[in-house]
Amino acid sequence: MDTEQTKRRPVILIGGGGHCKSVIDAAESARYPDSEPVFKIVGILDTADKVGTDVLGYPVIGTDDDIPALIGSMPGVHFVITVGHIKTARIRQAIAARVVEAGGRFATIVASTAHVSRHAVLGEGSVVLHGAMVNAGAEVGKQCIVNTLANIEHDARVGDFCHISTGAMVNGDCAVAGGVFLGSQSVMLNGARIDGEGSIVAAASFVRKTITIPGIYAGNPAILMKRL
């Protein structure tokens, strides 16, 4: 086997929708210092009716039911959950549990135009898409989506299974509980907290103080619109 093939990490993507396309683009862009690709996308898992189709040229090779067999037949393969997170993280959480139960592992993907500080922590299975920033001292949990142009500033803490959406800003010393969806171009004031797990912050909202009740929040300042 040649050197390039041994260096490239085989990955299988789970979910073939729009978010999958963004992750494919990020994975394709990831390179070693010698410019060789980091990842080799083996295929995609989706619903049974999609098997045999493709997403951006990559084949849909099976469904979630095939995860144990793929782990057994492909030593070294890693998975990336490419189902999106719009209203809840529950689907992503269930897929992750299924992979873990089968003994699988997850890849962490950082796009070539994103920046993750060497002084930051990025959890297993998380993806950081183009133009996003994770600054020094920040900690991002497992299975998070740090979407295009999102910014997680110094010393911020983001829990597992969060989605920091396009252009959202988590300022310094902020804390975000697990499963939170922070909508596009929303902003958290320095030191603000979202302690309500699974909360949703609407696009362009401004979180100025601590959120303790799980719910849907919107506006400037962000206020509780609906309990979850």
Image: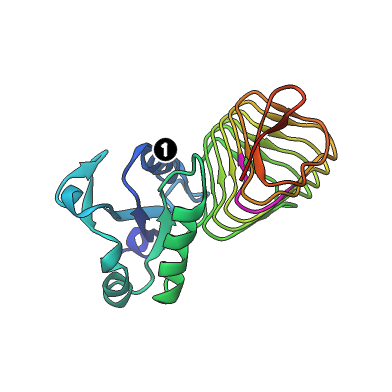
Instruction: Determine whether the residue tagged by mark 1 lies in a helix, strand or loop.
Output: helix
Q: Position of residue 119 (x, y in %)?
A: 75, 52
Q: State the residue at coordinates (56%, 30%).
A: 166
Q: State the residue at coordinates (79%, 50%).
A: 137
User: What's the coloring here?
Assistant: rainbow
The residue that label 1 is drawn on is 22
Q: Position of residue 174 (x, y in %)?
A: 79, 43
Is residue 190 toward the left or the right of residue 219 in the image?
right
Q: Is residue 163 visible?
A: yes
Give, as a single range, the part of the protein colored magenta: 175-181
Figure check: 111 above or below 98: above
Amino acid bearing label 1 = Ser
Crowding at dot 1, Cα within 10 Å, few <14 / some 14-19 / many 20+, comes out as some
Q: Position of residue 59 (x, y in %)?
A: 21, 49
Is residue 180 toward the left or the right of residue 175 in the image?
left
Q: Position of residue 193 (x, y in %)?
A: 79, 43
Report which quarter residue 24 is drawn in.
Answer: top left
